[in-house]
Amino acid sequence: MRQLVLTIGVLMSATFVALPAWAAKRVALVVGNDNYRNVTKLQKAVNDARAMGEVLKKLGFEVMVAENQTRQGFSQALLAFETSLDKGDTAFFFFAGHGFEITGQNYLLPTDIPAATAGQEELVRDSAVLADRIVDRLQNKGVRSAILVFDACRNNPFERSGVRALNGSGGLAPMTQLPEGVFSIFSAGPRQTALDRLSNNDTDPNSVFTRTFIKELQEPSLNLVQIAQRTRRTVSELAETVKHRQVPVYFDQMVDDVFLNGQAPLKADAVQASTIPTSQLPKVAALPPVNTSPLPAPDNPNAPIASFSRHNGGWTVVFSIADPALGISWRKGDSGDFRETGFMDTLDPRTRKRLPNPSIQLNADEPATTLQVRYIDATGEMQGPFPIRFDPEAALVRDQRKILDMTASNWLEFGGSNGLLYYTHLISYRCAIREVKLGFDTSVPDQVLKLPPCNQRDPMAVPSNAPIYMKVPGGARSVSVELQFRDGSVSEIRTFRK
């Protein structure tokens, strides 16, 4: 049985502001699979999808609810989802059901997935939906924001008595290499399973994660990161009550803060106090602005996207502009002259003119500000200015987090004749790290490694008095490490051996 229901979400109650005709859409596909034919059936996935769909409708999404999808039905639902999206839209994908990880890639299982055994990984790959491919399809559509939610970290669906288990794991692997504009959250961390219920007396129709997540989604004036952090804390605390470890993990590559349920409401007497500079107003990536600021909405698909990189001399800011540009200029704040970025010694094949320099430099001690960026398009028309928020602390965490993800094999140096464990690399990028846990001769890190505090002025410098190595206890032959990042997410556990 499969069912695909398309429901057009409407904005309800005075909490929401009517969207203008030109506003980018919000479109969601929610999938719930219970009725598996060849692997363990589930009880609450369909309920989870329905509950999520109802909440998203209230938040102004056009919602497609797909239940008990076969591989063909899943493909058709994804195609309908993809077709309904346009450039600059906000896309929301939710999956509740069985998920399976094979060699670091995540597969979402349709209801007709075969009962694979050891050595039959290709059966799963051929019959399931690759999660990374969903991200690619949304990126190809040019969506402004893509939000992916996976409540699929249940037990290994292929485990059966008397049969050697398939080489993989139940649940999903972390998606640490997401492109900009994508946010993902998983109902449980690496090597953890997600609870359907807290006990046999738990009558809630939804899983522990989904019931918590949909509640936080409806809280006004929370951005996605705040929703994820609050969900993470509540789910973890609920799981602890039944002696179970379940810590949801999220990965944030959004350019701006994303609010799904509006901004903090203004009091009636505060509405008239219109003296707040527009540069101090929070940016909203997924909702058109509700104020009367003359600045273009951040949802404008032509708006540049900025990436910030910290180096010893300060900040490099790189602007990505989808349209061909004949020139780029910028300024700090809402007043003053615009400065040209100059040109590179390269021709843009689209315009046959010199390529504008897409980068600028900011001082190491540059305070938080709003950058105004504009560009001349191929027709000679000026586009913008577009506001881009620069928050040095948040930008530093994001930049160092990316570096740590790309250099995971260098986190530790373990081996040699002296029996020492060096962790200089972690110290160099400590501003993105909240806590480091180590485990010696065990796959479960259980000891906290203290790092020196972050120095915002010289973040990558190793303090002269900071220890950079430790003696390995008891002649251990391996060490496992897990990083908890300052954005609330947790790394995959990695093992280093002598």
Image: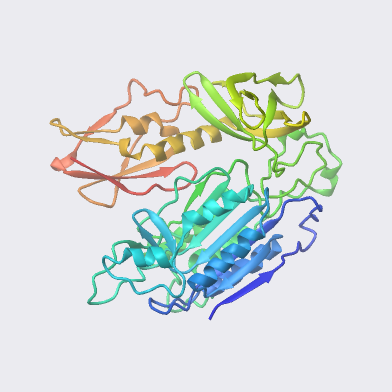
- Relative depth, front residue between 414 and 318: 318
User: Which residue is depicted at the point 57% across and 69% down?
Assistant: 49
Residue 241 visible in the displayed image: no
Residue 67 shows in this picture: yes
In this rendering, the count of numbered labels is 0
**How far from the left and from the top, in percent, is residue 139?**
57, 49
Q: Is residue 112 left or right of residue 408?
A: right
> Where is residue 261 shown, x and y percent of the image?
68, 55
Q: Is residue 433 above or below residue 315?
A: below
- Which quadrant of the view contains residue 426? top left
Identity of the residue drawn at 66% across and 35% down: 304
**Image quadrant assignment for residue 19:** bottom right
Q: Nearer the viewer, residue 150 or 134?
A: 134
Q: Position of residue 390 (x, y in %)?
A: 62, 31
Q: How is the image coloured?
A: rainbow
Indicate whether 421 appears above or below 129. above
What residue do we see at 70% from left, 64% from top?
58
The quadrant of the picture occupied by the C terminus is top left
Residue 170 place in picture, x, y as percent: 36, 64
Residue 321 versus residue 257 in the image, above or below: above
Between 66 and 279, the residue placed more toward the observer is 66
